Amino acid sequence: MVCCDDRTDPILISMETGLRDRVAIVAASSKGIGRAAALALAAEGTHLALCARNSDALEQVEEEVRRTYGVSVYADTFDVADDLRVRQFVEAVHRRYGRIDICVTNAGGPPAKLFLETTMPEWDNAYQLNLRSIVSFAHAVLPYMQQRHWGRVVTITSMTVKQPVPELILSNSVRAGVLGLVRSLATQFGPDNITINNVAPGYTATDRMKELAQSKAQMAGGTAAQYETEIAQSIPLRRFAQPEEIADAIVWLASERASYITGQTVLVDGGVYRGL
Ligand code: NAD
């Protein structure tokens, strides 16, 4: 932020995020982008409620957050596609903290497949994991945000919502629905001072990226390492994102500094999407 006084040169002052002592849910946060988002929010002094399927990895994040940032952490292990468990979790978070200010939705991605190889159960799973789970979180948290007349919902999707990738047909299709949801909720809950935005990551150096490279290698021949190099060379910034770079966009959208931004999709893709 730039500020001027009677000096000729502007002085830089830091951007206060206003996140200290707020309470944030970060879903699917034992690894990758979810984990990075949890740590970045904790660094701003936000108290956390985390969930994922893998209890060992989740405990490690819980421990790291407490040790490094000294904020409160609540964690539970469940599948975000389970609507009942999502609701129970949100209620437990509210009982514990008495408020829910921020909800970052996240989940694993659907398998990489070409259209004719997909099965109907895979379409059902992709819907449950990558669209319905967001509906579950939004249903459960929005009434609590309305009560306090303040809230931030940040969904994590993928750059495939702007630029479909052929072998990610499940992601391309189901995640487009998240944009419709985000836009609709932003309109409905704007009067409650709740903003709802979407972060669309590009290729990011996580386990998911390794999984995708492996699938592509199996489909097209070659090795996962060759495929990773090829992709990196196609990105204007010539590298994958680090999960922390996606987390920075999430923190910004969750902060006071993004108070007039709602219903948007923020691409963090190193320039992959070439549209205007
Ligand atoms: P990751 O594999 O590193 O981490 C996924 C996290 O989600 C883990 O903590 C895992 O335990 C949790 N998880 C998975 N399925 C879950 C479920 N059903 N219930 C609860 N927790 C669950 O993946 P990532 O790279 O951090 O990806 C996060 C999201 O971003 C995914 O939806 C992915 O498809 C999407 N994305 C990733 C990339 C990339 O290049 N890594 C690019 C675009 C979009």
Image (tube, rainbow, N blue to C red):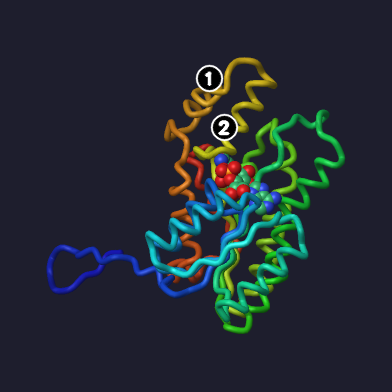
For marks 1 and 2, give the CA distance.
12 Å
Q: Residue at x 44, y 48 (%)?
A: 245
In depth, the one of 4 and 36 nearer the eye is: 36
Query: Does any portion of residue 154 appear in the rendered image?
Result: no
Q: Is residue 124 left or right of residue 155?
A: right
Q: Residue at x 39, y 62 (%)?
A: 43
Q: Residues within 10 Å of mark 2 (few under 14, many from 20)?
A: some
Q: Is residue 43 left or right of residue 11?
A: right
Query: Does any portion of residue 249 appear in the rendered image?
Result: yes
Q: Are marks 1 and 2 in contact (CB under 8 Å)?
A: no
Which amino acid type corresponds to the residue marked 1 in the rendered image? Gln
Res 185 quadrant in image: bottom right
In depth, the one of 91 and 136 nearer the eye is: 91
Q: Which residue is mark 1?
A: 226
Counting residues from the start of the chain, the first of labels 1 and 2 encountered is 2
Res 29 quadrant in image: bottom right
Q: Residue at x 57, y 23 (%)?
A: 224
Residue 206 location (% of width, % of height): 53, 39
Q: Is residue 81 left or right of residue 24?
A: right
Residue 160 numbered tag: none
